[in-house]
Image (cartoon, rainbow, N blue to C red):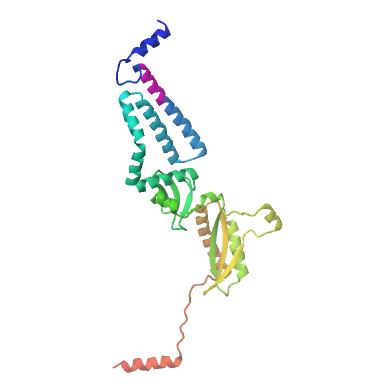
Amino acid sequence: MSLDSIIDTLETWGGNIDFLKYSLFTTAFTSVLLLLSARIINRFATKFISRHHKNNKLLMRSKTILIYTVCTYAILDLFTPFQTVLKTILAGSGVIAVVIGLAAQEAAGNFINGMMILIFQPFRIGDLIKINEGELLGTVSDITLRHTIIKTMENTKIIIPNSVIDKAVLENITAVGNQKGNFLELEISYESDLQKAMAIIAEEIKQHPNYMDIRSPQQIKQGDPEVVTRLVEFGENGMRLKTTVYSKNNAQGYAMLSDIRIAIKQRFDKEGIEIPYPHRSISIKAEKIAAMKEADEGKRP
């Protein structure tokens, strides 16, 4: 039996079945081919997204839903009973969209904003972000079509609807690169040696392993100081000093500032630099003390 006769025989199988658009063999072969194609396309799309949009779970889920939805539609179209249903769904898709939009405006808004986050990428999974000028600080752990999950410094997870986060004021700390400025603020008494205190601060900062010197080669050649401390205020109790200390990221900077404060406090104690705290002096005149004693003695029996 030749190959052509075998194919003709296979084509006749199921050819008289009313609910099949084509023969049984053609329908089965086409269905398998569509599923394999969907799987191959999904695999290539996954590799492409992983290469150009690392850790983007929202895009991964969206492409999988889209690919297999199209595949399912194509397979159902091979069966005659489903053709009428599919045409009805397509014809009424506009009405369905309006109904869904009116019934679930908030969910639709979250979906649209999720797509905007996916397209414009103000932040990605793994980014450290600050929301509404420090109202919330945390790392983006997941982005879905409905909400974004933030992991806070306290190791808790906060779920924020995409429609809310899209309206918030965001500061993407990770996006600034590998330099994070950290502010070190200290106060010394007016009686302390100001220049000596500034020198101690610079020495302790430069000794920390996570400290970064961000000077350019030109600035180093010109002899620009590595650490600059400013006198920013004459306070009620003492002089306020402020230094910008750079680290690779926010987590390192937070721990580094703690270490530097401890080291500076120990050096200040040794070098006689006083960190002031509020003092209250109460002065009572001798005449008033005598009057208080007399009044007290008069009350005794």
Q: Position of residue 1 (x, y in %)?
A: 40, 5
Query: Nearest the camera: 202 or 301?
Result: 202
Q: Position of residue 114 (x, y in %)?
A: 42, 45
Residue furthest out toward the right? 222
- The residue at 50%/56% (across/down) is 254
Residue 175 to residue 86: above or below: below
Corner quadrant of residue 86: top left
Query: Nearest the camera: 132 or 129?
Result: 132
Q: Is residue 215 magenta?
A: no
Corner quadrant of residue 57: top left
Q: Is residue 183 left or right of residue 148?
A: right
The answer, for residue 142, to whether it is visible in the render is no
Q: Is residue 248 left or right of residue 115?
A: right
Q: Main secondary structure of the magenta part?
A: helix
Residue 149 to residue 41: above or below: below
- The residue at 35%/23% (across/down) is 78
Query: Nearest the camera: 286 or 25?
Result: 25
Q: Is residue 26 magenta?
A: yes
Q: Position of residue 92 (x, y in %)?
A: 34, 36
Q: Position of residue 301 (x, y in %)?
A: 28, 93
Query: What range is drawn magenta here?
Result: 25-35
- The residue at 58%/72% (across/down) is 192
